[in-house]
């Protein structure tokens, strides 16, 4: 079964992060909520406090199949300022291991120079942050090992795209039906 890490920094968008966690766990994927802060407690952009499963230093990156960045402000900025995380994102990209981001977070990939010639989407108005990308206006864009999505309203399609990546289209479609998404 796939191992996924979703990274939380103070100011993360709660729905984007927790929807992905919920859908992955419903699909029996292993997903860890990882705090890049000093402790396990992380406060979202709307004041909702979440207890992460582990700290960044505890992640065994060689055992991870995908890294996920939720959006939100200043959460996205806080993730990008986390040098150890950025090093892993670049390493995953070089190895063509799965990386994904939603809302403002695809801009992190763009500023890191890993979207050159790739299709990607981002929160409306931030398209300029996708340096070198073929910008899409779709809910969720998949280009090889990179998955991107546009915002809180696309959290379910984004989560289902992650499920599809590891469990197949049929499983993702079935999960979508079970949660009464676009039935």
Image (cartoon, rainbow, N blue to C red):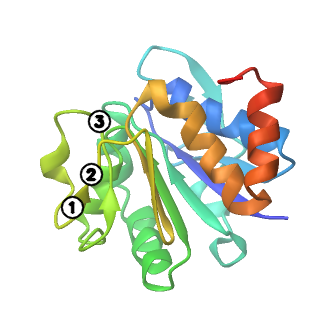
The label on residue 107 is 2
**Quadrant in which residue 3 is drawn:** bottom right
Q: Residue at x 21, y 61 (%)?
A: 111
Mark found first going from the N terminus, 1 or 3: 1
Q: Which residue is mark 1?
A: 111
Residue sitting nearer the eye, 80 or 133: 133
Where is the C terminus found, in terms of image quarters? top right
Q: Is residue 43 visible?
A: no
The residue at the point 82 percent across, 39 percent down is 174
Q: Earlier along the polypeptide chain: callout 3 or callout 2?
A: 2
| Observer-nearest of 71 and 33 | 71
Residue 16: image location, x then y, percent: 52, 32
Front position in the image: 178 or 46 = 178
Up-down relation of residue 90 to residue 123 (above or below): below
- Label 3 and label 2: CA atoms lie apart by 9 Å
Q: Nearer the viewer, residue 71 or 122?
A: 122
Give percent across and percent down for residue 55.
62, 51
Q: Which mark is residue 123?
A: 3
Are dots 2 and 1 in contact, CB under 8 Å?
yes
SS for tag 1?
Answer: helix
Circle 2: element type: helix
Please tell me how crowded label 3 is: few (under 14), some (14-19), or many (20+) other residues with Cα within 10 Å. Answer: many
Query: Quadrant of residue 130 in the image?
Result: bottom left
x, y percentage for residue 135?
A: 24, 54
Give x and y (percent) for residue 127.
Answer: 18, 46
């Amino acid at each position: 079964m796939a191992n996924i890490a979703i990274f939380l920094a103070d100011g993360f968008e709660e729905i984007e992060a927790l929807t992905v966690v919920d859908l992955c766990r419903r699909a029996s994927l292993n997903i860890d909520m990882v705090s890049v802060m000093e402790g396990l407690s992380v406060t979202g952009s709307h004041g909702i406090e979440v207890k992460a499963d582990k700290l960044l230093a505890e992640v065994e990156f060689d055992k991870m199949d995908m890294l996920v960045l939720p959006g939100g402000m200043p959460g996205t900025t806080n993730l990008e300022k986390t040098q150890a995380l950025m090093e892993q994102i670049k390493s995953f990209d070089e190895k063509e291991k799965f990386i994904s981001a939603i809302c403002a977070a695809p801009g992190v990939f763009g500023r890191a120079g890993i979207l050159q010639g790739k299709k990607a989407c981002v929160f409306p108005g931030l398209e300029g942050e996708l340096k070198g990308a073929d910008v899409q206006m779709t809910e969720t864009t998949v280009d090889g090992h990179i998955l991107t999505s546009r915002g809180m309203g696309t959290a379910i399609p984004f989560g289902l795209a992650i499920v599809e990546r590891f469990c197949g289209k049929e499983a993702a479609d079935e999960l979508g039906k079970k949660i009464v998404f676009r039935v």
